[in-house]
Amino acid sequence: MDNPQPIHENSETISTQSNSNSETLSSLQSTQVSLHSEITAEGKIILPLGSCSSTQRYCFICKSPNSRTRVPDKAIAQVWREKKIFIPRNNRCCHNHLNNDLFTEDAMQLIQIMRRRTLFSEVDLIKFIGFLTPLPTVFNSLSFGIASPLTSIDYANLTGLNKDDFNDLYSFCSGNIRNSSNRSARDALGIFLMKLRLNISQATLATMFRLDSQPMVSSIFDSVMNALTEKFVPTNLGYQHKSREDFIAQDQCRFAEILLKADPESSIVVADGTYLYIQKPSDCVLQRKTYSNHKCRNLVKPMMFVTTTGRIISADGPFFANNSNNDASILKDLIEKPESELMNLF
């Protein structure tokens, strides 16, 4: 018969294993502390959810003590759905951070997690559960906001520019187009570009972006055109926005030089008249001057000057569409004008 093994011989091993397991459990608990919830003596619950700072004395975004208002429920829900950050219900923020009871794009970028664990009262918890409830299926307006789900391909399909190019163009006019209660500055630029690319009616654009009326779309066009004219056009269009040497070095195709047997130091420019269709004018004289026998429509003709790589140098005009304004006569007029800057390219 085998002698029974004394317990004390394994007691040290058991103790060592017990300590090891205890240390491992303690380590796991410390690394996974964010997964646990707690109930306080007051009956409140602490959940492992990120939240911002809780304050009523100043704006929780910019810390300003002036012109504060309580954060609307719609804005609290917006931050949770888009950034998974909870805002305490009594928090205050500045009026200029809100737009139609929602945070502006700039404010959304400034909101950051300040706490990894959040104390919920009964009212807070009921409201938080409401945020988790799926919204009823409704028609959502199109948006070019930073948090928009539109992909770069979507941007290209709608505006002709991918998302990076759109952001680059927006940087030229962001300070000149203000956010309003109806649309953001990014939406304004997107509406303008969609009209240029897709030729959608203004009434349809108003419906797609949940705008109140068609005149509001016209006002958006004016704002965007003024902003682009002031900031974008001077540095990207016109004979003087780049020197002749820069055009030759950066925007001249080597294939065109070989095809035309041109001197590498000479500039090659493509000139062509194009069409902008217009409504039939009520003035009889303008009707005749803008009517094109070739297209059988009323239109005006801008004269485009483009490099061999496709960069638009200038768009002169527009000119009338009658027989006296063919491409040759328009080009001759531009060359012979004493104040013309066209010849600076040659």
Image: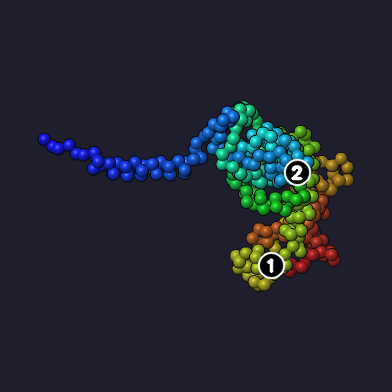
Q: Tell which of 329 and 22 is nearer to you.
A: 22
Q: Given the image, on which type of amino acid does mark 1 rest?
A: Asp
Which residue is at 61% across, 66% downward?
254
Q: Is residue 52 visible?
A: yes
Q: Look at the image and tell me in which quarter the N terminus lies.
A: top left
User: Which mark lies nearer to you, 2 or 1?
Assistant: 2
Give the percent coordinates (x, y) of residue 260: 64, 67
* CA neighbours of label 2 inside 10 A, class few (<14), some (14 to 19), many (20+): some
Give the percent coordinates (x, y) of residue 330: 79, 58
Mark with earlier residue (2, 1): 2
Give the percent coordinates (x, y) of residue 89: 67, 33
For label 2, the residue is 65
Q: Look at the image and tell me in which quarter the C terminus lies.
A: bottom right
Q: Secondary structure at mark 1?
A: helix
Q: Tell me: 128 left or right of 230.
A: left
Residue 122's place in the image compared with 231, above or below, is above
Give the percent coordinates (x, y) of residue 115: 59, 42
Q: Tell which of 241 and 85 is nearer to you.
A: 85
For label 1, the residue is 246
* CA neighbours of label 1 inside 10 A, class few (<14), some (14 to 19), many (20+): few
Residue 280's place in the image compared with 273, above or below, is above
